Image: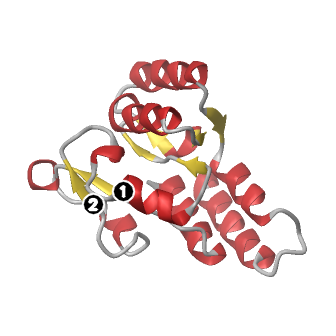
Amino acid sequence: VRDVGFLLDVANLLKVPALATEQYPQGLGPTNAELVHRLPPEPAAKVAFSSCGAPGLLAEMRRLGRSNVVVAGMETHVCVLHTTLDLLAEGLQVFLPVDAVQSRFRVDHDAALRRLERAGAIPTTAETVAFEWLGGSDHPQFKAVSKLIQERMKQLQG
């Protein structure tokens, strides 16, 4: 949750579009309360494991015209896996911040990450994504993002 929140905070600062889905919220419950205020107003509810099965999500991605996608969230071996495989099949380049995807069991997480890398997804970290989005220390939001990174470091240490 912490690293997904960090990515959302950086995306919001840098005006990087973020799309969100929820897996069957009626049965599994809503998105984590720590993330809700950072997300787009209405995460798309879905029953398909892939976020690409959420109504309108692929159309919105096409409208945004992005060829690179960062996928973060729960469960690495289920929703993240299916979403990433579908996005790769759509011809998109998918970056997977390994610290911002998670499964309940480490073995599921690790196996899914290996499979996704073999399928063409690019493993990375949340902090690496932040620096790639910035592009350089001359970015107008560099200091604000640096502050978020320092706050995240304190959370990791404490």
Residue annotated with mark 1: 57
Mark yes or no: residue 27 visible.
Answer: yes
Q: Secondary structure at mark 2?
A: strand
Seen in the image, is 75 located left or right of residue 112?
Answer: left
What residue is drawn where x is 49% and y is 39%? 90
Residue 94, given in percent of the width and then of the height, sits at 58, 41
Label disc, if present, on residue 44 of the rendered structure:
2
Residue 57, given in percent of the width and then of the height, sits at 36, 56
Where 140 sits versus 3, above or below? Answer: below
Residue 113, given in percent of the width and then of the height, sits at 52, 26
Q: Farthest bottom residue?
A: 140
**Mark 2 surroundings: few (<14), some (14-19) or many (≥20) residues within 10 A:** some
Name the one closer to the observer, 5 or 69.
69
Seen in the image, is 88 located left or right of residue 151?
Answer: left
Of badges 1 and 2, the one in the foreground is: 1
Q: Amino acid at mark 1?
A: Leu
Tally of numbered discs: 2
What residue is drawn where x is 30% and y is 64%? 43
Q: Amino acid at mark 2?
A: Ala
Q: Farthest left residue?
A: 27
Residue 154, given in percent of the width and then of the height, sits at 65, 61
Pick the quarter of the image with the C terminus.
bottom right
Mark yes or no: residue 95 visible.
Answer: no
Seen in the image, is 18 located left or right of residue 54?
Answer: right
Name the one closer to the observer, 141 or 32.
141
Where 93 sits versus 117, above or below? Answer: below
What residue is drawn where x is 48% and y is 47%? 72
Pick the quarter of the image with the N terminus.
bottom left
Disc with the residue nearer the chain's start (1 vs 2): 2
Name the one closer to the observer, 155 or 21.
21
The reply to whether callout 1 and callout 2 are in contact (CB within 8 Å) is yes
